Amino acid sequence: LEEHLRALGDLLGPFPYSELEIVERGNGVAGFAEAPGVIAVSRFDSPPSQVVTTRAGGDTLLGALARQWLVADLGAATSHDEWLIEGLVALARCGALQAADQGGRCQGDLAGARRSWLDLLDGGALGGDTRARDLLAGAVWAADASGAAWANRTLRGPLIVHMIRLLVGDDAMWATLRAVRDAYGGQTLSLASFLVQIQGR
């Protein structure tokens, strides 16, 4: 846990709160996904992989740690920007995994998101609803109107941010991630503000 926190600190800057409490609450973890300084898990997995396998709401404990910087202290300017925040959380999680020589886990997560997205587009969970499929394949910012807002945000957002990373390169992407936190920490982030930062790299 300390190693991953140090890696996230290197990527995102100092931890934004004076303390961090991680509590084991059984099934009662609802409402703690984005609480400043508090992460609730249902139960801790056994070492050595517990930070990357223990579930904290809909994410891993490592993802929940990244959310302390990027969701609890930053967050989306509007619902149209939520996909970007989800993508940045996935990016920070990948950075921490790479620092721990576990980059393959990041690649597996992205491949899994891609497979799930393609299955959804093929009509799996949509039950053949072509209108919903067309909305999902359209503008990513239309998450709330897409008919599958959670999937649009949490599956597609990380894939788009990863695509941007492949286009601009790691150095520019990591610099942008830190610049976004430095410039907008304690506020909110819009796509327009993110583009200003990445174009400056």
Image: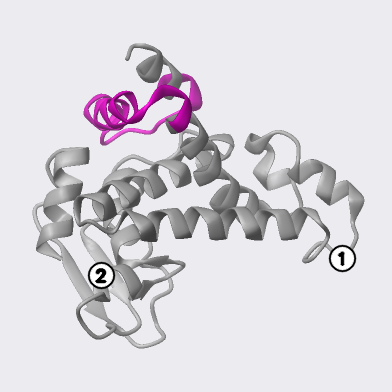
Q: Position of residue 12 (x, y in %)?
A: 21, 39
Q: Are marks 1 and 2 in contact (CB under 8 Å)?
A: no
| CA gap, disc 1 and disc 2 | 35 Å
Residue 71 shown in magenta: no
Magenta region: which residues?
Answer: 166-193
Tell whether 143 sits left or right of 190.
right
Amino acid residing under circle 1: Gly
Residue placed under numbered mark 1 in the picture = 127
Q: Is residue 16 visible?
A: no
Other-residue count near label 1 (Cα within 10 Å), few / some / many at <14 / 14–19 / ≥20: few
User: Which secondary structure, mark 1?
Assistant: loop
Circle 2 — which element? helix
Q: Which mark is residue 51?
A: 2
Answer whether residue 81 is visible to the viewer in this image: yes
Please, what is the three-letter code of the amino acid marked with disc 2? Val
Taking 163 as reference, is 35 left or right?
left
Left or right of 37, for residue 198: right
Q: Nearer the viewer, residue 176 or 118?
A: 118
Residue plotted at (32% across, 23% down): 172
Q: Position of residue 109 (x, y in %)?
A: 47, 59
Q: Quadrant of residue 148?
A: bottom right
Say if 20 sits above or below 45 in the image. above
Residue sitting at x 45%, y 31%? 166
The tally of labels here is: 2
Query: Residue 41 lies in what quarter of the image?
Result: bottom left
Q: Position of residue 154 (x, y in %)?
A: 54, 53
79 up-or-down from 198: above or below:
below
Label 2 neighbour load within 10 Å: few <14, some 14-19, many 20+: many
Give the main secondary structure, helix, strand or loop, of the magenta stretch. Answer: helix
